[in-house]
Image (cartoon, coloured by chain):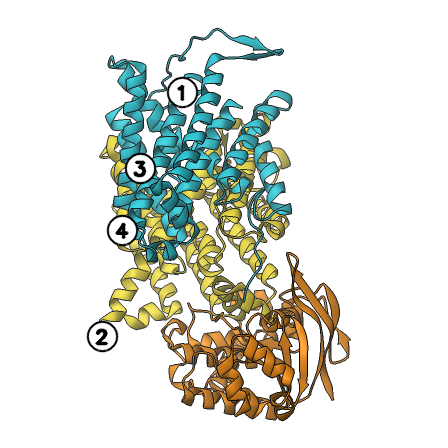
Chain colours: A yellow, B cyan, C orange
């Protein structure tokens, strides 16, 4: 168990095994769809965790990139005649470019100032989407064309389960690889002491920007997937609440924990589905769970459990 | 200016809690919502408006105290980000309880002094706008008197300046922080009572207010009460101005663009202390 | 041979002049100490030399090139490294990882290779790890290589910072109170480490309050008082300088002055 928790590559392998086995257990397409939603959110949270958990830079605006990815799938085919795969790449490129352009001035800020600046950036994206109604359909949203690859119509819960699951494994692998490289060490050092990192030759501005752009790409791809899965986009995909939800997933699962990103996403996706039974009490239960979990496990669920196991001799 | 005054109150409450406990309280908007909602239901149940308002303020203050004792204090050692998420969780909880105990509809209150607009120097004003401005000014004066004249207020200032030192001089920082939560909840609720005749309220109104209050506090310079008030007023004016002269759809956009521009040139906000890295 | 030349350096914070026209040169392999009462401007001087603060006047010349306005990470590429008076350790990392970060300037920064985890990245990681272990052994921390930095003692963290700074293979190493908080045994170890560093051809600039250490290992000593140069010379010359004694007696450190006299 200890080795499992310390070896990140084993962890990615375990995630891959779970993705492969889960369809045998899940009783219906509805559950496949929920699992796909978990994976899609987890991809965005992984990116955010790279930025927040490893590099230590807060963002309350990542739904902006998520929304760009989602709307690219609706707008690309309609206005530019692009096939879906090209729209996905285009949306990713736009998100990366936006992150690159706003990242440098924004990432000079610290703490709460950074939080409010990223929040403002996300809000601006959301406002453009909901206000340019004649292009984006405004609050009513837009239909998304199904993706067609080599004549194959990519749709349905099962198909998207596999696409998002495999993508999640790849995303986790990318993060693990980065963390265990000079880039990862540079990012983590920035989290602990920016000044020491600078003195050791690390171009802090460059690495913060790198983490920001990578996390934007992850969020954008996740947004595109969600649009394709749903066949529909609305401005909530870019909204402030989604930004907050992504941060809650990252913090609840555990900042700086790759498995935590997935666990956090799973809890926040599955819980509301499960709570629809309670109907009226959904908000109350959700809020209470967040508060109670974080009081009991302030470092997040996965790191807290890992610490428990470590304390006990294996 | 009316909106700005409400933002200023939210930002002020935000700053008060931040200074005494280092917690960025995203549940601040819920106090405003509670102020409006409880007053409405009290009034609808037949209480006189004033009594209903006092009841609402007391309810919000109790919620503020519970928020601190039940959610913040037990997580004392958690990181700032975790604490923020806890307050967000608490705000979702408060919203949920409000929706169940009260309801999910939009509500308004009657204006305290009628709806007849009047004209001062060419500008048309609603009586309620004056009430808001007058009320906010009263709150500011009362808060200033509390801080400068009472022992509890002074210990609050001392705790804000340096918690460890305050503890060493025998100040009960737990009681002080409780006070900060109670006061800032009450301030928020007063804002809710004052604004509801103009802006309407419902169980989900707190999110956006918390956001604007946070933005205002940051714009003014985190931790600076004067900055919070100025930040709130500036934010309100910007919104009114851009809604009036540019586009009402993009009024929030203008506000955020201005905040971004301010932060790019003044990374510590309008009134934030310029810090020199000491290593 | 001069490696580092500081010319007429000055900076003020809100009207208070912290460093006022200080000049000195440091030679290759030299141990050069900066001493002075608290508030003399030693750490501020370090912050300017390492690029953390931008000096308001004066020049810094490193190996013949003007580096006055370079950022810290650019200076690191040119062979400047330092430790910190109040620890700036990467507490969420292990001791070995801390030192590995120090190797950054000598590592390949191709992000795509990192994302793909190419074999070259693994080979490099192994080399970086080996370098880190060698440096940890040099400062006596080989045993705790895989312990979280947050679990180490104050004295160990001071030495960890030295190992991390050395990992960058600097020409000039600025040590800010390396012996602060260390017991006599640890201080002696640091003494040996510093001499070894200088023996490898690195110029060491040292800020230290432990006068016995300073007097024992420094080739030259530069005394600062209230931002200005008070005296320059060998240990013996500085020890006998009446202005220095007066500054220390008038300032905070009677005990330091007594120790300095032997």
Query: Alpha-carbon distance for marks 2 and 1?
Result: 59 Å
Q: Residues within 10 Å of mark 1 (few under 14, many from 20)?
A: many
What residue would you read off at disc 2? A313
Q: Nearer the viewer, residue B213 or A176?
A: B213
| Circle nearer the viewer, 2 or 4 | 4
Q: Earlier in the sequence, mark 3 or mark 1?
A: 3
Q: Are marks 3 and 1 in contact (CB under 8 Å)?
A: no
Q: Which residue is mark 3?
A: B64
Q: Are marks 2 and 1 on the same chain?
A: no
Tell me the crowding category of disc 2: few under 14, some 14 to 19, or many 20 or more residues within 10 angstroms, Cα based. Answer: few
> Residues at badges 2 and 1 in contact (C-beta under 8 Å)?
no
Judge whether residue A146 can be spotted in this image.
no
Spot occupied by residue C244 in the image (x, y as percentages of width and height)? 62, 82
Q: Are marks 3 and 4 on the same chain?
A: yes
Q: Residues within 10 Å of mark 4 (few under 14, many from 20)?
A: some
Say which element carries label 4: helix
Q: CA distance from mark 2 to mark 3?
A: 43 Å
First in sequence: mark 1 vs mark 4: 4
Q: Which residue is mark 4?
A: B74
């Amino acid at each position: 168990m200890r080795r499992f928790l310390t070896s990140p590559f084993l962890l990615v392998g375990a995630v891959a095994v779970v993705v492969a086995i889960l369809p045998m257990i899940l009783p219906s397409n509805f559950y496949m769809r929920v699992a796909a939603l978990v994976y899609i959110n987890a991809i965005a949270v992984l990116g955010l965790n790279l930025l927040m958990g490893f590099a230590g830079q807060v963002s309350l605006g990542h739904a902006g990139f998520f929304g760009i990815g989602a709307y690219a799938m609706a707008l690309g085919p309609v206005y530019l005649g692009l096939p879906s795969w090209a729209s996905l790449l285009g949306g990713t490129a736009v998100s990366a470019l936006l992150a690159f352009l706003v990242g440098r001035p924004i990432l000079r800020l610290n703490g709460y100032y950074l939080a409010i600046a990223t929040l403002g950036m996300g809000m601006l994206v959301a406002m453009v989407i909901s206000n340019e109604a004649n292009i984006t359909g405004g609050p009513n949203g837009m239909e998304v064309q199904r993706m067609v690859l080599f004549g194959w119509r990519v749709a349905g819960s099962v198909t998207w389960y596999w696409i998002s699951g495999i993508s999640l494994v790849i995303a986790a692998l990318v993060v693990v690889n980065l963390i265990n490289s000079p880039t990862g060490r540079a990012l983590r050092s920035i989290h602990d002491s920016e000044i020491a990192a600078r003195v050791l030759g690390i171009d802090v501005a460059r690495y913060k920007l790198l983490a920001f752009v990578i996390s934007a790409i992850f969020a954008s791809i996740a947004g595109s997937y969600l649009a394709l899965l749903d066949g529909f986009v609305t401005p909530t995909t870019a909204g402030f609440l989604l930004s907050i939800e992504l941060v809650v997933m990252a913090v609840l699962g555990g900042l700086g924990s790759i498995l935590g990103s997935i666990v956090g996403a799973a809890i926040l996706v599955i819980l509301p589905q499960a709570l629809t039974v309670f109907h009226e009490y959904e908000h109350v239960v959700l809020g209470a769970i967040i508060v109670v979990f974080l009081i009991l496990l302030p470092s997040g669920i996965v790191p807290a459990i890992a610490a428990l196991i470590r304390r006990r001799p294996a | 200016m009316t909106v700005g005054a409400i933002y200023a109150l939210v930002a002020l409450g935000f700053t008060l809690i931040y200074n005494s406990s280092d917690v960025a309280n995203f549940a601040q908007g819920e106090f405003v919502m509670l102020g409006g909602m409880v007053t409405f239901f009290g009034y609808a149940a037949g209480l006189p408006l004033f009594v209903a308002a006092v009841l609402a303020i007391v309810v919000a203050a109790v919620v503020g105290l519970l928020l601190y004792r039940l959610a913040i204090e037990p997580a004392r050692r958690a990181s700032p980000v975790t604490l923020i998420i806890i307050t967000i969780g608490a705000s979702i909880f408060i919203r949920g309880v409000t929706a169940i105990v009260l309801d999910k509809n939009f509500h308004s209150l009657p204006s305290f002094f009628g709806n007849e607009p009047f004209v001062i120097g060419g500008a048309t004003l609603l009586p309620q706008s004056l009430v808001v401005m007058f009320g906010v000014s009263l709150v500011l004066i009362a808060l200033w008197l509390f801080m400068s004249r009472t022992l509890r207020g002074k210990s609050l200032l001392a705790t804000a300046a340096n918690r460890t030192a305050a503890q060493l001089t025998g100040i009960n920082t737990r009681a002080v922080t409780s006070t900060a939560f109670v006061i800032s909840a009450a301030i928020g609720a007063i804002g809710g009572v004052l604004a509801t005749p103009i802006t309407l309220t419902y169980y989900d109104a707190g999110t956006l207010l918390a956001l604007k209050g946070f933005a205002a506090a940051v714009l003014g310079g985190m931790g600076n009460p004067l900055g919070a008030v100025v930040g709130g007023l500036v934010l309100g004016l910007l919104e009114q101005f851009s809604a009036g002269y540019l586009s009402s759809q993009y009024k929030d956009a203008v506000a955020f663009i201005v905040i971004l521009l301010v932060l790019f040139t003044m990374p510590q906000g309008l009134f934030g202390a310029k810090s020199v890295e000491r290593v | 041979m001069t490696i580092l030349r500081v010319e007429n350096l000055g900076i003020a914070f809100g009207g208070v002049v912290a460093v006022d026209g200080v000049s000195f040169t440091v030679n290759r392999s030299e141990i050069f100490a900066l001493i002075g009462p608290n508030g003399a401007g030693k750490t501020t001087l370090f912050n300017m030399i390492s690029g953390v603060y931008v000096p308001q006047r004066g020049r810094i010349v490193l190996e013949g090139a003007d580096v006055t306005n370079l950022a810290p990470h650019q200076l690191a590429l040119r062979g400047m490294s330092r430790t910190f008076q109040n620890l700036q350790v990467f507490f969420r990392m292990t001791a070995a990882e801390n030192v590995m970060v120090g190797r950054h300037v000598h590592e390949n920064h191709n992000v795509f290779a990192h994302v793909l985890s190419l074999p070259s990245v693994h080979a490099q990681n192994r080399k970086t790890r080996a370098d880190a272990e060698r440096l940890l052994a040099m400062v006596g921390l080989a045993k705790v290589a895989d312990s979280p930095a947050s679990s180490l003692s104050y004295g160990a963290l001071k030495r960890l910072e030295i190992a991390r700074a050395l990992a960058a293979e600097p020409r000039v190493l600025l040590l800010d109170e390396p012996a602060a908080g260390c017991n006599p045994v640890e201080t002696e170890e640091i003494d040996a480490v510093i001499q070894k560093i200088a023996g490898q051809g690195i110029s060491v600039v040292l800020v230290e309050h432990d006068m016995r250490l300073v007097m024992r290992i420094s080739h030259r000593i530069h005394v600062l008082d209230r931002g200005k140069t008070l005296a320059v010379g060998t240990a013996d010359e500085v020890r006998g300088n009446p202005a220095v004694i007066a500054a220390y007696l008038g300032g905070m450190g009677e005990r330091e002055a007594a120790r300095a006299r032997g």
